[in-house]
Image (cartoon, grey):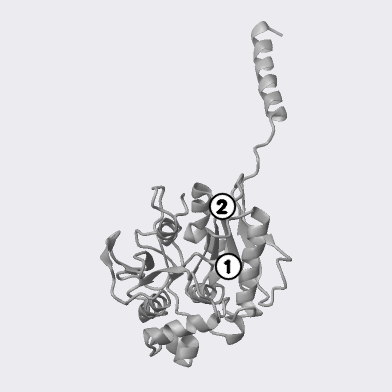
Amino acid sequence: MTQTRAATLLTVLTALLAVLITPAPASAASLQEVTGFGSNPGALRMFRYVPDGLPAGRPVVLAVHGCTQNAAGYASGTGWLRLADRWGFSVVLPQQQSVNNASGCFNWFQSGDIQRGQGEAASLAQMVDRQLADTGGDASRVYVTGLSAGGGMTAVMMATYPEKFRAGGVVAGLPHGCAQAAGSPYVCMYVGAAQTPRQWGDRVRAARPGYGGPWPTLTVLHGTADYTVKPVNMTDLVEQWTDVHGADQSADVSDTVAGYPHQVFRGPAGNPVVETHSLTGMGHGQPVDPGTGSAQCGTAGAYFLDVDLCAAHRLGLAWGLGS
C-alpha cells in the first residue's frame, strides 16, 4: 500500500469513527397525547406541545380546533407551535371524537357541554389544570382560542371558567349562549340572536354565578365574507363582552392592521377589554400569513386562509406572549 493510499484510508476511517461515536442530537419537541388528565366527562382527547427546555413559569395556550379538523392539523395550520418555540410557552390542543360529534365539532351548542363542571367544558378545564401541574406553567397567564366551533367553545370557557383564563381569542366563532338565545345553533350561525348587550352579558354572568371578576379580555377575528358563521356573531361577541366588562359599545380605537379594520374597546379603567379584526373579503376560516417573517405564521389550506395576517401572531402580541 502506498503512503498516499494509506493516508486516504486513514482519513476515511477517522471520519467514519467520528460519525459512530458522535451522540445523536436531542430529539426535537413534538405533539404528544396525554391520558388520564382527569375524569374527562366530555370524553375528549388531550394533546400538548412543550418546547424543548421550556422553563417553569411560562404561559399556556389552549387552542381548540374547528369542525372536521384535529389537534395535529390545527397545531401546524395555525402556526401556534412555531410561536411556542419562538416565544417560549406551551400549547394544549384538545381533540374531539366522532362518538361525541360526527363532524368533529366541539359541542358549543349543547347545554350539557357548556356548563361549568359538566361535559366538554369540564374536560377542557381539566386539561389546563394538568398542563399547569406538569409544566409548572404560570396560572395567571393562561389563554384560550379556537376556530369556528372551537371559537364557540372559547367563549364557553371564558364564561364558565373565567378565573382560569386571562384572555381569549375567538376566530370565526360565536358568543356564549348563542344557540340557546337564538333557539337553534343554525339560526345563531346564519342569522344571530336578538339580544341586547345586557342580555348577552347576563348569559356570561349566569355561567359563573357569584363571580366578581376579573373577567378575561377578548380578541375577535372574523371574515366579512363568512357565510358559515355570519359576521353578526362578531358584533354580538363585542356586545356580550363589553357589557361583562362594564364598557360601552363605542370603539375607543378605530384603525387598520395589515390593511384590515381594527377596533379596540376600553373598560372603565381605560384598559383594552375587547379587540376586533374584521378581515375584509375573507370567508370562513383561520387567518394565516405563511412565511419566515417575524409577523408571519401558519400554513394555508382548508379553513386556513392566507390573507397576509396571522391570527395566532396577533393574539400572541395582544397577550404579551413574547415577554
User: Is disc 1 placed on a helix, strand or loop?
Assistant: loop
How many discs mark residues in the rendered view? 2
Question: Around disc 2, counting alpha carbons within 10 Å, would you say few (fewer than 14), some (14 to 19), or many (20 or more)?
Answer: many
Sequence order check, earlier mark of 1 and 2: 2
34 left or right, relative to 255: right
Residue type at mark 2 is Arg
Question: Around disc 1, counting alpha carbons within 10 Å, would you say few (fewer than 14), some (14 to 19), or many (20 or more)?
Answer: some
User: Is disc 2 placed on a helix, strand or loop?
Assistant: loop
Determine which quarter of the picture holds residue 187: bottom left
Residue on which disc 2 sits: 58
Name the disc covering residue 70, or none: 1
Q: Nearer the viewer, residue 18 or 110?
A: 110
Above or below residue 135? Residue 20 is above
The residue drawn where x is 71% and y is 24% is 17
Residue type at mark 1 is Asn
Residue 164 in percent (x, y) is at 56, 67
36 left or right, relative to 300: right
Residue 150 in percent (x, y) is at 52, 73
The residue drawn where x is 44% and y is 68% is 217
